[in-house]
Amino acid sequence: MNDDKFKEECGVFGVFSKRNFNTPVITYYGLYALQHRGQESAGIAVTNGQHINTYKSMGLVDSLLEHNDFSNIKGKFCIGHVRYSTTGESKIENAQPFICNSKIGQIALAHNGNVINKNKLKEELGKNIIFESTTDSEIILRIIVKEIDKGKRIEEAIISTLKLVKGAYSLVILAKNKLIGIRDPKGIRPLSIGKLGDDSIISSESCGITSLGGEIIRDVEPGEMVLIQENGIKSIRICEKEKNYLCTFEYIYFAREDSIIDNINVYVSRVLAGEELFKECPAKGDIVIGVPDSGVPAAMGYAKAAGIAYNVAIVKNRYIGRTFINPYEKIRRQKISIKLSPIKVNVYNKSVIVVDDSMIRGTTARSLIKILRNAGAKEVHFRIASPIVKSYCKLGLDIKYKKELISYSRSIDEIKNSIGADSIGFLSLEGLHNILGKDKSFCFGCFNGKYPYN
């Protein structure tokens, strides 16, 4: 819904089934649970042990059913992907999974993340390779195939390839009799392993497992390759263990509330952020409201800590896609006013405290404050349950230039005036680290400019 959000937004899913060969159906519903991570395109790749077939479409996961009946498509191994374009254009050629031929047969790959040395890697592949897409994900696959064609086993080829890759990635890879999941050495993007009966599942988030009725086994560790075959699950290190630098925006916004990432409950972390926010930035008001949907848990935490009633004052039109995940600014702006409507009786002549999870560009905040004032709100105090975003990111988020940020060349007071609020407050970086766990490391790059990779 929100323009004031980063987008990283891709989701990967994979399943191996010993008995139920209808893995495309399982993958379809797994992707459904990951739909929040990308709404531009969706795709599935399935193997019957001989060939890999892919099915892709632009739009939501639903759109895959327009031309495919997955109930009649069989295979023991399957992977899937939902995409938002952080690199590459928004077109069907860039929809994943990608597939490529090698000496050992077809290989398919789906990727969540961003490769920051992609141009160098593409040059090293040579000019003779004709790329089918404009994404960094295909570059990873092409290098893996190149290593396989040198005579390496697929596991060795993957390790050799990823030693060259610099950036964020969670990968699912499909060969004719193997499902492979990999998380980058810094652990910037999440990846979970689970089971559904006798079936093995890999998913960007644990909600992709539990929504199917499955059981979470654990997170894939940073720098770990998980190999799933007929004879079981094997763990392989692709590098020495490093510090985990999970992107904090997974907890702030990206992940679904019912997910658990690296043993931290996403919903609980957002409620705690709201409670901490009140301690740092108290405000007097008649009601506390959350910006739907991602700002609601923090608003509930803020209201609880403040001892002020939490109420619903904004209705969201759920039939319009998340504006933040739409790559075109004009469309984002048009959708915001259509998506949000006030419940006037709850705000008229009241001092309203609005809590959101983050603020990036400020467009949603401006529109929302205007909506509330037009509905009769006496005062509007804005509170953000994350620190001020000060830097752009090269690891898979959509902000490429600092001037896109509302904080660019503005003081906090100037930000307040820019959005039209009576007051504004942000959670401190220390406060965010406290609620996530001081004993753990994270990527706070968009807040302090310090990234795992220079």
Image (tube, grey):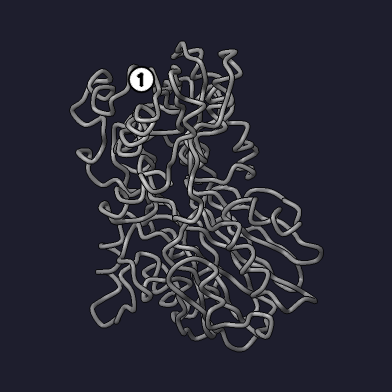
Question: Residue 256: x, y in percent?
Answer: 57, 46
Question: Residue 287: x, y in percent?
Answer: 52, 20
Question: Residue 117: x, y in percent?
Answer: 30, 57
Q: In the figure, 73 relative to 115: above or below?
A: below
310 left or right of 327 in image = right
Label 1 element class: strand
In depth, the one of 288 and 261 nearer the eye is: 288
To which residue does mark 1 refer?
A: 424
In depth, the one of 317 and 17 nearer the eye is: 317
The residue drawn where x is 40% and y is 23% is 377
In this view, the residue farthest toward the bottom is 50
In depth, the one of 186 and 56 nearer the eye is: 56
Q: In the figure, 301 relative to 37: above or below?
A: above
The residue drawn where x is 51% and y is 58% is 11
In which quadrant of the rendered view does residue 132 lie?
Answer: bottom left
In depth, the one of 402 and 113 nearer the eye is: 402
Q: Is residue 180 visible?
A: yes
Kind of residue at disc 1: Ile
Q: In the figure, 273 relative to 293: above or below?
A: above
In the picture, the quarter occupied by the C terminus is top left
Question: Residue 129: x, y in percent?
Answer: 30, 81
The residue drawn where x is 45% and y is 21% is 353
208 left or right of 216 in image = left
Q: Is residue 425 visible?
A: no
Q: Residues within 10 Å of mark 1 (few under 14, many from 20)?
A: many
The residue drawn where x is 35% and y is 44% is 337
